[in-house]
């Protein structure tokens, strides 16, 4: 997929919502190729500044070539040193460090992992995002088109609540949902699904991991984390090509 093709695809399904604050890919468009994994958060964080035209979905289609925002974009305090690429590991936020830990478990370079969000609209809180249902409906056809190219073995969602449920709602369950690790304090859930990738039907496993935020960790009764337990890595390794 090229950047022009991605732009056409996003404009086709989102129309004038491409002028809203947000982003489509946290990886470069070059990551939309055959790959074993597809990573999804819920929506881009940060302040939804409607006056900044450089902050819109139509402009922020993807990360620069050879980069991934989780690994390379400065998410620290504005104005401090570090807004260069590639970003050194010590300058990554705990959330970025956790996701980079997932990339390590995939045994893939961050730049090669298709990284996106179920919703492309920016909001610093999920609860503050308006029209979530309509955003999901508009964004999912874009995901289907990208998934038909990537054809992953495993979709990984950041969050075992809203994001995981949103992906599961797009298909039909084949097997029951299973915990990964301690079933009394699960930090990940997996489910085999039949998903429509637009021009093809595919059986795929969806893995929801605890969101790497303070709130996500507390919700799963875990300490603040910068990496995931080894059980997650063992599960992910089964799906690597």
Image (cartoon, rainbow, N blue to C red):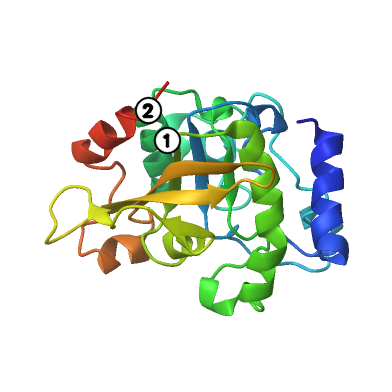
- Tell which of 167 and 88 is nearer to you: 167
Residue 104: numbered disc: 2
- Tell which of 13 and 21 is nearer to you: 13
Locate residue 213, reporting x and y percent. 38, 58
Q: Is residue 23 visible?
A: no
* Rendered image quadrant of residue 233: top left
Mark 1 secondary-structure assignment: helix
Locate residue 220, reporting x and y percent. 25, 63
Residue under pointer 1: 100
CB contact under 8 Å: marks 2 and 1: yes
Mark 2 secondary-structure assignment: helix
Give the Cα distance between marks 2 and 1: 6 Å
Task: State whether residue 40 is above or below residue 128.
Answer: above
24 lies left or right of 104: right
Locate residue 186, reporting x and y percent. 20, 57
For the point 63% across and 61% down, the residue is: 119
Q: In the rendered image, which quarter contains the C terminus?
A: top left
């Amino acid at each position: 997929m090229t950047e022009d093709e991605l732009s056409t695809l996003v404009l086709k399904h989102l129309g004038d919502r491409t002028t809203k604050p947000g982003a489509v890919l946290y990886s470069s468009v070059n990551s939309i190729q055959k790959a074993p994994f597809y990573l999804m958060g819920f929506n881009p964080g940060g302040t939804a500044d409607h006056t900044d035209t450089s902050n819109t979905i139509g402009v922020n289609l993807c990360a620069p070539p050879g980069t991934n925002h989780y690994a390379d974009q400065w998410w620290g305090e504005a104005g401090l040193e570090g807004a260069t690429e590639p970003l050194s590991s010590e300058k990554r936020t705990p959330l970025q460090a956790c996701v980079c830990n997932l990339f390590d478990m995939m045994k893939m370079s961050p730049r090669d992992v298709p990284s996106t969000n179920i919703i492309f609209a920016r909001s610093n809180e999920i609860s503050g995002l308006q029209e979530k249902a309509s955003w999901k409906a508009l964004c999912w056809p874009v995901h289907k088109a990208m998934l038909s190219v990537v054809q992953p073995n495993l979709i990984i969602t950041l969050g075992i609540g809203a994001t995981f449920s949103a992906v599961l709602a797009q298909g039909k369950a084949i097997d029951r949902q299973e915990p990964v690790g301690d079933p009394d304090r699960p930090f990940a859930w997996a489910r085999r699904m039949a998903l429509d990738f637009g021009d093809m039907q595919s059986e795929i496993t969806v893995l929801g991991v605890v969101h790497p935020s303070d709130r996500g960790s507390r919700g799963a009764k875990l300490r603040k984390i910068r990496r995931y337990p080894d059980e997650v890595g063992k599960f992910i390794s089964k799906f690597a090509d």
